[in-house]
Amino acid sequence: MNTNRNTIPLARRGFTLVEALFAVTFLAVLFLAVAHTSSRASDAFDEGNAEHQLYRTTHRCMDKMVQSLELASRNALVPISAFPTLGASTITFATPTGFAGGVVVWGPQTTIVREPETNDPDDGIDNDNDGVVDEGRVVWIESPGTAEERRTVLASGVADYLEGEQANNADDNGNLLRDERGLSFEASGDVLIIRLTCLRMDENKRELRKTVQTSVRLRN
């Protein structure tokens, strides 16, 4: 009986060339799919993190302003009321520190103002090359113009103009104001309306914006 010594049992036979190519192709497609999914997940995380930071920055700034303005004098509305259709990007006020003889004792003045960022003046150019044009900051100034003056930045990345607004002397965003800045104060009787738009670029250089608005009724 003749035996073919070159015969390999089926159980021990290796992959054919076609099978090997198919396996390599399948693995390559699988690896690409995993890499694409991982990249999308990373992008979503980066964008979500940027949005979270923007949310915190905007709301913390608004909360700080509201907490102080709730106790402010109604006189804080006087300079704003002079320009009811323009809004204002600054406000100066005082808050009570106590009573003396039944009379309110007022503390030193405080100013809240939107200022251009140090390295990006309001000139229509991205001077600091961060992808955002003319961003500003909200600055808290205690005892302005005195030797005791102290300045604190409440928020950076404040938009040049409020979301939806443009510098064209028109009411673009439908809030009855014209050309209001990224920080805007509006007076209505004893009520002060505060609007704030902050922005930043995410990891993919996409611009994110967050706008918050609240009303404060002055008590004093």
Image: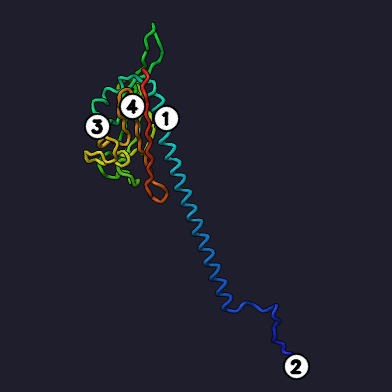
Q: CA distance from mark 3 to mark 2?
A: 107 Å
Q: CA distance from mark 1 to mark 3?
A: 25 Å
Question: x, y percentage for residue 127?
Answer: 29, 44
Which residue position holds label 2? 2
Question: x, y percentage for residue 82?
Answer: 23, 25
Question: x, y percentage for residue 216?
Answer: 37, 26
Amino acid, disc 3: Thr
Amino acid, disc 4: Leu
- CA neighbours of label 2 inside 10 A, class few (<14), some (14 to 19), many (20+): few
Q: Which mark is residue 63?
A: 1
Which residue position holds label 4? 192
Examine the rendered structure and indicate whether residue 163 appears above or below residue 26. Answer: above
Q: Residue furthest top?
A: 101
Which is in the foreground here, disc 1 or disc 3?
3
Q: CA distance from mark 3 to mark 4?
A: 14 Å
In-image side of 81 versus 49 (left or right)? left
Question: Which of the 4 image quadrants contains residue 196?
Answer: top left
Question: Which of the 4 image quadrants contains residue 123?
Answer: top left
